[in-house]
Amino acid sequence: MKDLEKILSKALPDKIPSQIIAESGKEIHHLTEGEYLDKPKKVFHKQYTLDSNFETKGQKTDSLNIPEVIARYAGIPLPKQEDLLFIDTETTGLAGGTGTYIFLVGLGYFRKNSFQVDQLFLTDIDGEESFLRELHKYLAGFTTFVSYNGKSFDIPLLSGRYIFNQSENPTVNFFHLDLLHLSRRIWKNSLTDCTLGTIEKEILGLCRQVDKDIPGLEIPQEYFYYLQSRDATDMVRVLHHNYYDVISMYLLLSKLSIFLTDTDSLEFLEEILGMAKLFAEQRDFLAAEKLFRKILQLHPQHKDGRKRLSYLYKNNCDLCNAVKLWERAAEDNEIYAFIELAKHYEHRLKNYETALKYTQNALKIVYSSCYENTQILAELQHRLNRLENRLTHER
Amino acid sequence: MDINEFLEDFRKKKYFKTNIIAHFTESAREGQSCDFPAEMEASLISLLKQKDVHKLYSHQHKAFLSAQKGRNLVVSTGVASGKSFCYILPILNEYIKNQESCGLLLFPTKALTQDQMQSFQSLICQLGSDDQKSKTGIYDGDTSGETRRLIRQRANFVLTNPDMLHLGILPHHTKWARFFQNLKYIVIDEVHIYRGIFGSHFCNVLRRLKRIAEYYGAKPQFILTSATLYKVKDFIQRLLEEEFDLIFENGAPVGEKHFIFYNPPIIDPEMGLRKSSLQESVLLANKFLEKKLQTLVFAHTRRKVELILSYLQQNRKGSNNIFGYRSGYLAEERRSIEKRFKQAEINVLIATNAMELGIDIGSLDAVIINGYPGSISSTRQQSGRAGRKGAPSLTIFVATSNLIDQFFIQHPEFLQDSNPEEALLDPDNPYILLNHLKCALFEKPFSDRETYGDLSQQQLSEFLGILKKYGMLRETGEKMYWKGDNYPADSISLRAAGASGYLLKAEGKVIGTVDENSAFWMVHPEAVYLHGGESYFVENLDREKYIADLIPLKTDYYTQSQTTTDFNLIELEKKEEKGRIVKFAGDLQVISQVTGFKKLKWFTNEILGYGEVDLPSVEYCTSGFWFSLKKDLVEKLIENKIWNNSKNQYGSEWKFIAERIRQRDGNICRECGLKGNDSKKLAVHHKIPFRQFDDPAEANLPDNLVTLCPGCHKKIESQYIIQSGLAGLTYLLLQLSPVFLMCDKTDIKAHFEVRSKLAANAPAVIFYDSIPGGIGLADKLFTIITKVLVKASDLIKNCSCKDGCPACTGPVAEHGAGAKKSVENMLNLLLVEE
């Protein structure tokens, strides 16, 4: 082996990792409450009930009423709160693939109107099969996963683990509500990023205890260290981290549900705009109109809000209101307004002269802007020619 | 007009007659066909009949039967013999019987995948039922995310390449569970490509594939197709590590085949100068064009393709039946050219060996090979492109003035001797093996009874032990698991070439691409770049955005860049004196730099001037091995006067020129000041050796000449003696080492330096791995160099050539006449133990 090692020296790390000797008395069950679910002690189970510290900012923690718009956005049937299973996993890597193992699953759910969190922890990789078997039991009775980025990470990975162990994959029957997608929809423009950490701080106003928690990136290496040392000190922090993630997801969904049910309580402009866009997309015309109007009440000159509302009207065949908004936007020299008005006067009112006037105004803006949009220019030219033709024919 | 009529006419012409050095004819052979085998499903037979196929060629028949028996099989037949039917028929037959059955089809390039996809899909769609189209899909780097998902869920037949299998499929095999469970056939097309390091990687990818298939309870059969290959059985055995049937025949009808060795005529007898091979190829292509015979012209380099193209297009303004084809053209453009050539809308196509690889362009009448492609098997492959069903065909090999070509044309029997190069690979190269074991471990834990490829349990456990020691493996229970938070396949590339390339932009449009390694010498600023027969001037090379800005510009010249290669020692690992040489091994930094370029006049190749290029050097680190000649060896070489090279022919004017130079220098040796007289004439020396010039007049320019006394002349000339000897030795060793290292010729590189700073300014030969970082090839030479030297000495003694040939010390012109003798003596001296 020495010779081979020498030949391979360039392909190997510079240092041999130092030998870690297993300690005793620091196993997971020594350091935290919980029990093993199997004889070989590979699957550790821990249960929490939501403590009152999480009642922050006047949010209630007892029940959830998910509004229709969320279910429609996620493309799932409207779930009742007892259908929901909040899920978050901790893994040996973020790259995915069959060599990435799941060693901790946190599950949050309602039992008799109170929120409860269970965790399954894998104490060594060779216990994976029974780990998955135990997990399977916990999934029974629920219909809908709630996750943060679980659609592209946690659930495909979990599926892969079941397939890898050649056992029945229980995740296929679940609906899935991924809160990351929803949050992006609403806060993309107002937050620097939409990681769960940022949402916690900026939206939920929570603050994690640094000494109890652990940065996500360090988790795989800490788990490998634990496997060797059997010292679960840092695993307790990982458990806490995972528990906190599940709780955050719950609080986030609760907040979103309240916001989207009772939109009058909203204060921040970007937030209102995000939600308005969400309603408009889900064709909830009334809710969207109400929010866009609220934006214009707060900021009458809000250009994006005005534009979106005008198109909402147009798509809903309320041209009267749309034209009013376009006329206001035309005063601000907004090109889309001129184009829409030109269309309106040409096709609906057959008033070619006014249509020509708006087209010329639009062209003026294109010419005076510093960069040329050739497609718009061509379209406008085309319209101009057509209108001039029509006018000469009329005369 | 057919080829035989053309030939009759051609051989009568006096001009051509004298240039034909040899003419081989392979007589036509009737095809051997068989009825459809009894085991073939009725619906498949009726599908074939619809396609107007009523019988099978004997090799297709054999392949089908062998597959039915559940055997692995390798089909090695000629070009255009209906090879793809050998795997398509068994696959479809199985699919008709079992609609769940799956097949994995591996092609070495994306272009080939596209090509095969079309023919495969058109067949399967005709098998009836609704959504057959979704049963087949290409899964490669260009496939979109949504299509990928659909293919994983539904496709029975997946066409992909080894790189994607390694990087995207195997590490995610649980997403492919359905596919693997039903995997019945694995097809490897053009298997002869997998040689050298690429082949060694690929063999390990196959080992991983088999392991995963087994995990899902599948035992797929392999169907391989290969070009005719020397020792094909050994090669496949090593690659596949399974038993297989070898089908080594061609049942397709073959028309009469002519192969002509054509040497351009001598135009300057005194200088031995021949007419340019390019112009002769153009002349020949024009002849074919006149007679409406469809022709494919092969040229070595991208530039030559463009040169021939633009020569041919001269006086044919707006002709759209002549095209070029090479890497650097956009993919869609290439697909369209392939299609139009197949439909005979294009009469003459000029291509680099990018065309060599099985891409279906139909059959044609004639092939012109401009310049020896570098190996016998390539020559055969290129020639095999000619030949319509049963009709006669013609290949003309046009020799360049390059000495390899001149050697080849003097020894046409080489083409017929079945002595082509052997394809080698070494899947157990420790570096490659270790890396793939990481991937294998990632894909599935190892049990302690498991084996891998042809590795014994003990060998395997030695490697796994190292992974464990370095913290990449966890052993628990009865198994060993991957222990890492990364994705090991990411850091292993199966091929050496880098992925990024430069975009070529002209007038706001992208007209093509150039790979990163070639950009500096092909599209440096002020270069004249040829594309589609048009010349472009390179205005700017943006190295941040990877864009070359070109301006269409008619010039009366083209450019040729000049590159130097230099080495820096990073770390010396080993040093050992051995007889008269000193061996070294260590890490080297290889620096290659484009230093400038020549402007050459079109047609005449006259040098119009030089330009400078200000580009950074391309640098990479790799492992190297080098040996230097000890002082006493060098002295002996000079003292033995073995350099007594035959006199160069300096031209008829030489006497007068030399006299003028002596007068200019006052008849004094410019080195030591010795004065000459009539009885003791001083010598006139070429500062840059005469043979390094294309144009003798340029070599004899006064600036390149200096007067020296015989003593000083000898001293300086001896430098060149060493140089030509070293050059020959380097060439010889580079030819031999791949056999010892089981790698491909392109996997290792060699250089020589007369005064090497790597070896205290002694003359040295330097070898280095061509893959950045190295994979231990050069390092292995450190241990086995004596063996290689002994073999080299044997080879040179047994070689029948006089002054060196491509089979031993290399082309005479490059290394100087007498190089063979120098090398022979060098080897004698350094193999004698003192």
Image (cartoon, coloured by chain):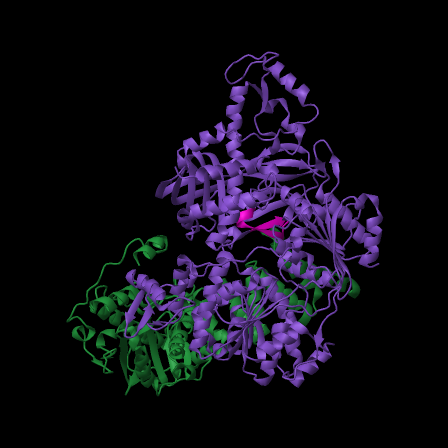
Instruction: Assign the magenta stretch its main secondary structure.
Output: strand
Relative image position of residue B719 (x, y in whole percent): 50, 29
The chain drawn in purple is B
The chain drawn in green is A
Note whether residue A91 is visible. no
Relative image position of residue B427 (x, y in whole percent): 45, 61
Q: Quadrant of the C terminus of chain B?
A: top left
Quadrant in which residue B701 is drawn: top right
* In this view, B632 is above or below B176: above
Note whether residue B654 is visible. yes
Which region shows up in magenta? B502-518
Whether the magenta-drawn stretch holds residue B99 is answered as: no
Quadrant in which residue B67 is drawn: bottom right
Q: Which residue is drawn at the image coordinates 77% and 49% (left, top)?
A: B284
Q: Nearer the viewer, residue A8 or A162?
A: A8
* In this view, B579 is above or below A200: above
Quadrant in which residue A394 is drawn: bottom right
Q: Which residue is drawn at the image coordinates 60% and 21% (left, top)?
A: B684
* In this view, B408 is above or below B93: above
* In this view, A233 is above or below B328: below
Q: Nearer the viewer, residue B23 or A44?
A: B23
